[in-house]
Image (cartoon, rainbow, N blue to C red):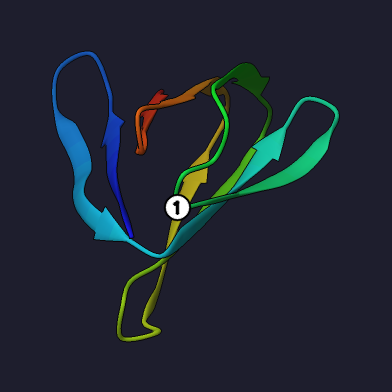
Amino acid sequence: MFKLIVAQVDKTVFQGEVVQVTCPGAGGDITILSHHSALVTPLRFGELKIVDDKGTEMRIPITSGILEVGGNEATVIL
């Protein structure tokens, strides 16, 4: 598991420990798992698919953003 934060300028949309998150990257969808290598990439229109340790899926629609991964944490800025 790893820490995921999804935030807008004025609020936190999601914060917690997750098993994976799939994001609509500029070059195609990208799935982040625990201990993923460091990465910064722009995101395109689509949705984030978050899976917790119980297998529960949460979907968050986005129009664009930035994904940053490092130190067993991922941050999405919308």
Q: Which residue is mark 1?
A: 34
Q: Quadrant of residue 11?
A: top left
| Left or right of residue 52: residue 68 | right
Q: Is residue 72 left or right of residue 49?
A: left
- Which residue appears at 42% of the width and 25% of the height? 70
In the depicted view, which residue is nearer to us: 26 or 62?
A: 26
Evaluate whether residue 40 shows in this view. yes
Relative vertical location of residue 74 with respect to residue 38 in this rendering, above or below: below
Question: In this image, 28 relative to 42: left or right?
Answer: right
Query: Could you tell me which secondary element the residue under label 1 belongs to?
Result: loop
Q: Position of residue 68 (x, y in %)?
A: 47, 21
In-image side of 19 versus 62 (left or right): left
Mark 1: which amino acid? Answer: Ser
Residue 9, relative to residue 49: is it above or below?
above
Q: Residue at x 40, y 65 (%)?
A: 19
- Of residues 56 and 53, the one nearer the viewer is 53
Percent of width and height locating residue 27: 85, 28
Residue located farthest toward the right when viewing the structure as drawn = 27
Looking at this rendering, what residue extends furthest in the left direction? 11
The residue lying toward the viewer, choosing from 7 and 2, is 2
Give the image location of residue 46, x and y in percent. 65, 44
Which quadrant is home to the C terminus?
top left
Relative image position of residue 48 (x, y in whole percent): 52, 50
Query: Which part of the image, by quadrant, shows the N terminus?
Result: bottom left
